[in-house]
């Protein structure tokens, strides 16, 4: 680990205090990681919500009725493996789910309550969330396509978790770092996190200097030529 942090707790504290998705995304671009943002439809339920944590990936699939499965007993199980996946959340993890059509809610208030109890720090779903009033009262960082009450019960089941998933071309592996704020959600591959966050911290601190200089009258051209930041 670089001298800036020694463990996840220290890294996540720096991220919460100093970073945001735009600066992290810029640094990933510079490192050749050009496809790390989830689609813009994935937004926080409330603009001040922020999450950072390790990805706990969840794979969902559409079904057509709560009871089914002529050849697969899993399809006859309510919610498939969703309850097991939810109960497997660990401290500082983000529940991130995809695989289904975006026609029903993949996250809700009771799930948020359980996640908080386990020390999880957010939920990101490639679809809708529901129980919005309850989630907002809990203050649990939730990122989705927005509120929509239609339930996954008869429409979708979790078929696996802690497996590689992909959302609109963004590959997410278990343990990758997920960051979400008002500008969207980005994923930092675990294999590149040291380089990404070292660069992001340097850039964020440099941007504060540039902003102060421009506020003091320096031109944008001069600021960029001097600091290489804009």
Image (cartoon, rainbow, N blue to C red):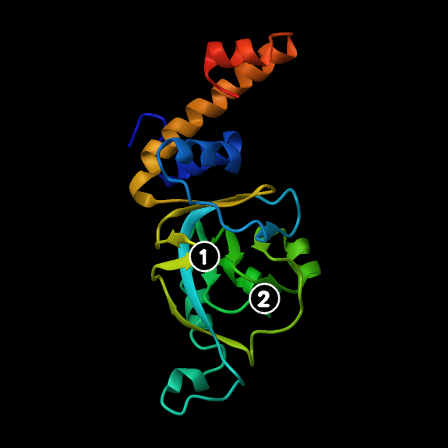
Most extreme residue toward the bottom is 70
Quadrant of residue 8 within the rendered picture: top left
Residue 169 drawn at (x, y percent): 42, 54
Side (left or right) of 95 relative to 150: left
Residue at the (64%, 55%) spot, across then down: 138
Residue at the (34%, 38%) spot, across then down: 193
Side (left or right) of 46 relative to 25: right
Tell me if residue 158 comes above or below residue 69 in the rendering: above
Residue 90 drawn at (x, y percent): 41, 56
Residue at the (49%, 25%) spot, across then down: 204
Q: Which residue is mark 1?
A: 167
Residue 86 drawn at (x, y percent): 46, 65
Which element type, helix, strand or loop, lies under badge 2? helix
Asked whether residue 6 appears in the rendered view, the answer is no
Asked whether residue 137 appears in the rendered view, the answer is yes
Q: Residues within 10 Å of mark 2 (few under 14, many from 20)?
A: few
Label at residue 110: 2
Q: Please state which of residues 170 and 202 is positioned toward the viewer in this rendering.
A: 170
Tell me if residue 149 comes above or below residue 155 in the rendering: above
Q: Nearer the viewer, mark 1 or mark 2?
A: 1
Q: Please state which of residues 83 and 195 is positioned toward the viewer in this rendering.
A: 195
Label at residue 182: none
**Label whose residue precedes the other's in the sequence (1 or 2):** 2
């Amino acid at each position: 680990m670089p001298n800036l942090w020694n463990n996840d707790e220290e890294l996540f504290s720096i991220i919460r205090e100093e970073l945001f998705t735009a600066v992290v995304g810029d640094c990933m671009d510079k490192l050749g990681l050009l496809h790390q943002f989830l689609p813009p439809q994935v937004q926080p339920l409330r603009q001040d919500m922020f999450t950072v944590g390790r990805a706990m990936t969840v794979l969902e699939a559409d079904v057509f009725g709560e009871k089914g499965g002529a050849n697969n007993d899993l399809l006859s199980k309510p919610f498939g493996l969703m309850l097991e996946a939810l109960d497997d959340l660990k401290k500082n993890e983000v529940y991130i789910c995809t695989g289904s059509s975006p026609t029903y809610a993949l996250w809700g208030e009771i799930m948020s309550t359980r996640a908080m109890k386990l020390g999880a720090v957010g939920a990101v779903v490639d679809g809708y969330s529901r129980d919005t009033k309850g989630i907002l009262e809990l203050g649990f960082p939730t990122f989705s396509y927005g509120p929509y009450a239609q339930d996954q019960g008869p429409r979708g089941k979790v078929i696996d978790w802690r497996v590689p998933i992909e959302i609109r071309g963004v590959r997410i592996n278990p343990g990758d770092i997920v960051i979400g704020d008002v500008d969207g959600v980005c994923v930092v591959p675990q294999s590149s996190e040291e380089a990404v966050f070292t660069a992001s911290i340097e850039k964020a601190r440099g941007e504060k200097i540039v902003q102060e200089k421009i506020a003091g009258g320096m031109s944008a051209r001069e600021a960029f030529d001097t600091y290489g930041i804009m």
